Image: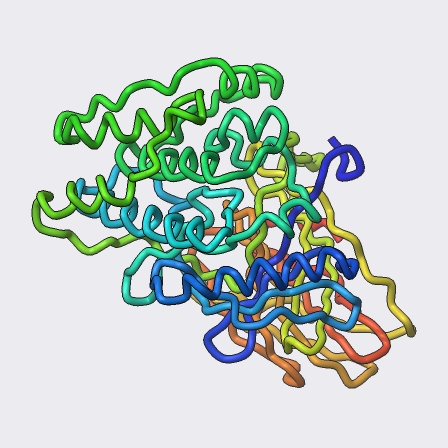
Amino acid sequence: MSSASRPGPVATIVAGPGDTVLKVYPGSLDRRTRAALDREQAALSAAAHVPAILRVDEICTPAEGRIALRMPRCDRSLAGLAEPLPIRDALLVGEAVARALAAAHAAGVVHGSVTPGNVLLRYTGEPVVADFGVTLRRRFPHDPLHDLEFAAPETVRDQTMDERTDRYGLGAVLHLTLTGEPPHHAVVGEQPAVRIHRVLTEPVPPITRPDVPGELAALVAGLLAKDPERRPADADVQLSRLLDAAPPAIPLDLPAEPILVLEPPRPEQPPPETASGKRKYGVATGVIAGICAAVAVPWSLTTADNDAVVPGSRLPPAAPVEITLSPPVDHETFVELSWTSNAVLDYAVVLAEEGRREPLVIMVHRSEQRRVEVRPGLRYCFLIQGMNPQGTYESRPQPIRGAVCTP
């Protein structure tokens, strides 16, 4: 399905100044929406004493008028969790999310989309919840199938976002940490209408893991109730009590995500094939920069079955600027890149790695060479982007190891 027929990506997360990231949204805000966002953030400041809430340090506007939020950087999230966590670790995550939600609700702020991708880990391993607020979610709605398996039925049905849907999200995150699966497991090849019908009508299967305390399993079942009124409002208290009685902690060891640019998944569609049967590792990019001192890159990247990403919009060049990327020199564990241009530009190296939806973006500023670490045996595409006050420009992509790059 084309990007015109469904809402596209909500935002792109890029490296910001210092140890921060920027969440860059695809458009601007009118005065009323900006005022609502400011009120929401001001109210959330009343819960700033809760460490499990990832704060927003600044709301800023890049040169193209897009809205961006600057916040502390966290390299790991629960989005990639595929195995159950030990009981105490699951409780640590659940209690942190519950405390963050309770504090935000007390301040009058609803999260609106509690999903594993919004539960992050600080460098210290402490869980935090990011992206509180419904103002930007309503201004920039996402693909309704994105994170469908974690969404409350009423959110799927009519886009309801309130304290009760947040509680459902808490239950969904707990279900993932305890089972390694979402409440409604995705079925390969299932039609969207069937997926939606399951979320709306079918109960979540009970947790049968033998070491999960009955009280915890019952709490998760209550939070995932179809009837919003049945979802318990004191989950933070219950989880704290369960945590006090849990066995000793094992440090969370989720894999780090070596990515400077992150995007939510796009609508699923079959990946294109070349005449030789090789997958295409495509790039369709645009760079924006502004007072937040960062770069944001929307991508078109297809690397595995059902991992297609719809192209983002391309910013047209304002002058006939050329960037020429030489063929990469592959040293198995790293690649040497060099390029030239007929203009003075600030550069970014952009690469697509086989098996990842999201690209990696490395800022190199005025340098025209870069050594980039890669993984042996994987295929890659490289692209150089440059920017000056007149526009954004890009080289032709260059592959290694037989990858096929889509310009």
Residue furthest to the right in view is 319
- Image x and y of residue 218, in percent: 24, 25
Seen at 9% across and 43% down, the residue is 245
How far from the left and from the top, in percent, is residue 118? 46, 50
Residue 207 coordinates in the image, percent (x, y): 25, 24
Q: Residue at x 77, y 72 (%)?
A: 63
Q: With 167 as the anchor, is 274 left or right in this view?
A: right
- Answer left or right for 319 relative to 230: right
Could you say which is closer to the camera, residue 293 or residue 134? 134
- Depth check, front residue: 263 or 121: 121
Coloration of the structure image: rainbow
Question: For residue 169, what is the image quadrant?
Answer: top left
Q: Quadrant of the N terminus?
A: top right
Q: Is residue 123 above or below residue 116?
A: below
The image shows residue 181 at horizontal and vertical percentages of 36, 31
The quadrant in which residue 288 appears is bottom right
How many numbered marks have been drawn onto this rendered protein structure? 0
Relative placement, left or right, of 99 versus 218 is right
Residue 388 sits above or below residue 51 on the image: below
Taking 224 as reference, is 317 above or below it? below
Q: Residue drawn at (60%, 24%), measured in percent from left and top?
A: 157
Q: Is residue 73 above or below residue 105?
A: below
The residue nearer to you, when weighing 2 against 238, is: 238
* Front residue of this view, candidates 130 and 312: 130
Residue that appears at 23% across and 27% down: 217
Q: Quadrant of residue 384?
A: bottom right
